[in-house]
Amino acid sequence: MLQKLDSEGLVKHVKYRGTTLTKEGLSIAKAIIDRHETLTRFLELFDIDEATIYRDVEGMAHHVSRPTLEAIRSVTNHLAEHPDTLATIKESKIG
């Protein structure tokens, strides 16, 4: 796998010496972390348990599009800034 990532220019791998991310690899890694953090933050607003959040984020992060992620980020930011709106939503949710 390291050889494949190296050939794709995402890491610089030197056998027995170590592996480092390239600029492009670091950019992709940061985007993955951002996806996970955004989705986690959104689900945490609704008091979903940590184990469920972990499982759901693992699945969602691989399939969510950039526009959808931005929409989720916007809603998350709004709800975090307007706890009264979040409370209203939480009161009305089914289940």
Image (tube, rainbow, N blue to C red):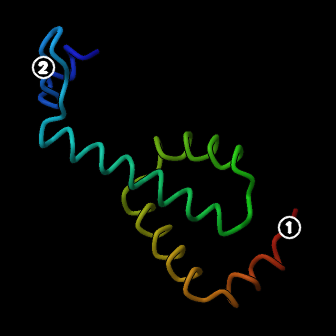
In the drawing, does residue 25 fall left or right of residue 67?
left
| Residue placed most toward the observer, 64 or 76 | 76
Hey, which quadrant is residue 66 in on the image? bottom left
- Which mark is nearer the camera, 2 or 1? 2
Rendering coords of residue 60 (x, y %) = 54, 46
Secondary structure category for the residue under label 2: helix
Give the class, few, some or many, for how many residues have Cα within 10 Å of label 2's Cα (few <14, many ≥20).
few
In the drawing, does residue 56 fall left or right of residue 62?
right
Hey, which quadrant is residue 28 in on the image? top left
Q: Residue furthest top?
A: 16
The C terminus, quarter of image: bottom right
Q: Residue furthest front?
A: 17
Amino acid type, residue under disc 1 in the picture: Ile
Q: Compared to 44, does 8 lie above or below?
A: above
Amino acid type, residue under disc 2 in the picture: Ser
In the drawing, does residue 5 fall left or right of residue 43?
left
Residue positioned 75% across, 53% down in the render: 49
3D distance between C-alphas at marks 2 and 1 = 49 Å
- The residue identified by callout 1 is 94
Hey, which quadrant is residue 29 in on the image? top left
Q: Compared to 8, does 71 lie above or below?
A: below
Q: Compared to 43, does 75 lie above or below?
A: below
Rendering coords of residue 21 (x, y %) = 18, 34
In the drawing, does residue 2 fall left or right of residue 12?
right
Q: Indicate which disc, 2 or 1, sits on the residue closer to the N terminus.
A: 2
Rendering coords of residue 51 (x, y %) = 70, 43
Give the class, few, some or many, for how many residues have Cα within 10 Å of label 1's Cα (few <14, many ≥20).
few
- The residue identified by callout 2 is 7
Residue positioned 11% across, 29% down in the render: 9
Residue positioned 48% across, 61% down in the render: 38
